Structures are given as structure tokens and as C-alpha cells.
Amino acid sequence: MRGGSHERALRRAGRYGDGWITTVPDIDGFRADLGKVRDAARAAGRDIADLGPVGLYATFHLERDGDKARAEAPEHIRAYFGAHTRGESNDFFGSPDEIAQRLQGFVAAGLTMVVMRFVEQDLAKQVGLVREALGFLRPVHTAGS
């Protein structure tokens, strides 16, 4: 798999990669970058179906109450990262339904895999809530992605 959002990295992923993973958390940026990967694959004579998984790496914190998840997230992030402050946000904080709604747009754009970093220590709870969120997602079938 190859990652990166720079033009050259996107072209390499399309030409040579067996998958692509990004940290771009907004749907427009994700679509644009994936389009560049697919364009590079086509230009190299590859079938885009051969690109393999299309992934997103992001930070997650879920609660039944989405407002509670967003309010608690900064404390969990400080506990997880310590004094390290992150400049760029790729966070998915909210209720299972909210997370599913946000991810559905990525699925519609071509997402096939998510690598989740949980900032809360109660992993069993987070995994349960993520399973619930994933249960809301619907596959998208498109011709000629």
C-alpha cells in the first residue's frame, strides 16, 4: 500500500500501488485525491479494480450522545498524545449514527477500509459502538468507478 497526499505520491499509488490509504478527513479532499490515484492508474494502463483497498486512517471517539463524544474528545486526545499537540484534525467524534452518516459519504466515494485509532481507553466500548455504526453503512455499487 502507498500513502500520501502529494501529487507525486498519488501518481505513484495509481501506477504501482496495491492499495491506497489517506488521512484526508474531508470528503471533498478524499474524492479529489482518489480521483488522482485512479487517473494515474488509468494512464499507466491499469484497471482501477486492481488498485486494491482504498483506506482512511483516522482518530475515533464514539458515545451514544454525539455531543458528549465531541466534548470528551479533547481530554482523551491529551491523555492519548500527552503534551504532543496535533495541528491537523482527522477526527471522527460522535454517535454511531453520526459516524455512519459521515463515513457513508466516503464509502460512496470509494472507501473500502478504515484504520481506526481510538483515543478512549475503553476499547471494548469503542469497538461495540463502532460495530453499531458500521451496521448503518450501506454498500455502494457503481459502474466504472
Image: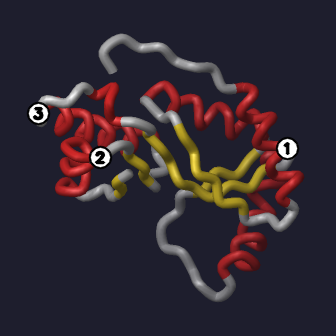
Q: Given the image, on which type of amino acid does mark 3 rest?
A: Ala
Residue drawn 80% across the image and 64% down it: 120
The quadrant in which residue 135 appears is top right
Residue drawn 20% across the image and 35% down it: 41
User: Relative to residue 89, is residue 128 depicted above or below?
Assistant: above
The quadrant in which residue 82 appears is bottom right
Q: Nearer the viewer, residue 28 or 35?
A: 35
Residue drawn 64% across the image and 51% down it: 92
User: Considering only order in the chain, which callout, 2 or 3, is on the residue closer to the N terminus?
Assistant: 2
Position of 145 with respect to 60 (left or right) is: left
Mark 3 residue crowding within 10 angstroms, few (<14) / some (14–19) / many (20+): few
User: Considering only order in the chain, which callout, 2 or 1, is on the residue closer to the N terminus?
Assistant: 2
Q: Nearer the viewer, residue 23 or 112?
A: 112
Structural distance between the alpha carbons of marks 3 and 2: 14 Å
* Residue under pointer 2: 17
Q: Nearer the viewer, residue 42 or 95?
A: 42
Q: Secondary structure at mark 1?
A: helix
Q: Given the image, on which type of amino acid does mark 2 rest?
A: Gly
Q: Secondary structure at mark 2?
A: loop
Mark 1 vs mark 2: in front: 2
Residue drawn 38% across the image and 51% down it: 1
Position of 79 with respect to 57 (left or right) is: right
> Which numbered tag is attached to residue 47?
none
* Residue under pointer 1: 128
User: Relative to residue 132, is residue 63 depicted above or below?
Assistant: below
Q: Are marks 1 and 2 in contact (CB under 8 Å)?
A: no
Structural distance between the alpha carbons of marks 1 and 2: 32 Å
* Residue under pointer 3: 43
Q: Given the image, on which type of amino acid does mark 1 rest?
A: Gly
Render colour scheme: secondary structure
Mark 1 residue crowding within 10 angstroms, few (<14) / some (14–19) / many (20+): few
User: Considering only order in the chain, which callout, 1 or 3, is on the residue closer to the N terminus?
Assistant: 3
